[in-house]
Image (cartoon, rainbow, N blue to C red):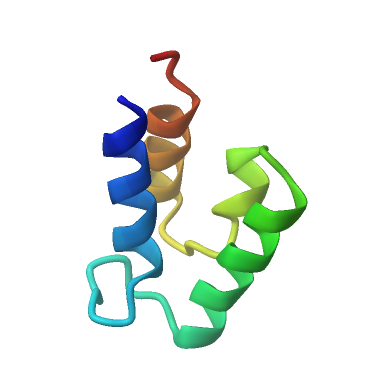
């Protein structure tokens, strides 16, 4: 499961991915927050779509 979580995280911050409608600044902010915390709610806060963000937070918080 860790590999899947890593893949999804990389997809979120990828410069080639516009699926999450994030600016480059948003992606950099997510990277910065990941370095500061393990709280996915905090890390993914720059994702503006609340439903999408909450789904991702739930996904990342699931136990392996």
Residue shown at 27% from the left, 36% from the top: 4
Residue shown at 41% from the left, 58% from the top: 49
Where, by quadrant of the figure, is residue 13 drawn? bottom left
Nearer to us in this view, 34 or 55:
34
Left or right: 33 in relation to 45: right
Left or right: 17 in relation to 14: left
Q: Residue furthest front?
A: 3
| Residue 51: percent from left, percent from top | 38, 45
Left or right: 58 in relation to 36: left
Placement of the C terminus among the 4 image quadrants: top left
In the rendered image of this protein, does residue 47 appear above or below residue 7?
Answer: below
| Residue 25: percent from left, percent from top | 56, 84
Residue shown at 45% from the left, 50% from the top: 50
Placement of the N terminus among the 4 image quadrants: top left
Q: Residue furthest bottom?
A: 24
In the rendered image of this protein, does residue 2 appear above or below residue 40?
Answer: above
| Residue 7: percent from left, percent from top | 28, 49
Residue shown at 49% from the left, 74% from the top: 27
Q: Residue furthest top?
A: 63
Nearer to us in this view, 54 or 36:
36
């Amino acid at each position: 499961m860790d590999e899947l979580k890593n893949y999804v995280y990389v997809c979120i911050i990828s410069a080639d991915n516009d699926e999450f409608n994030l600016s480059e600044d948003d992606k950099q902010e997510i990277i910065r927050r990941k370095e500061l915390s393990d709280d996915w709610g905090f890390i993914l806060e720059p994702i503006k779509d609340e439903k999408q963000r909450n789904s991702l937070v739930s996904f990342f918080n699931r136990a392996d």
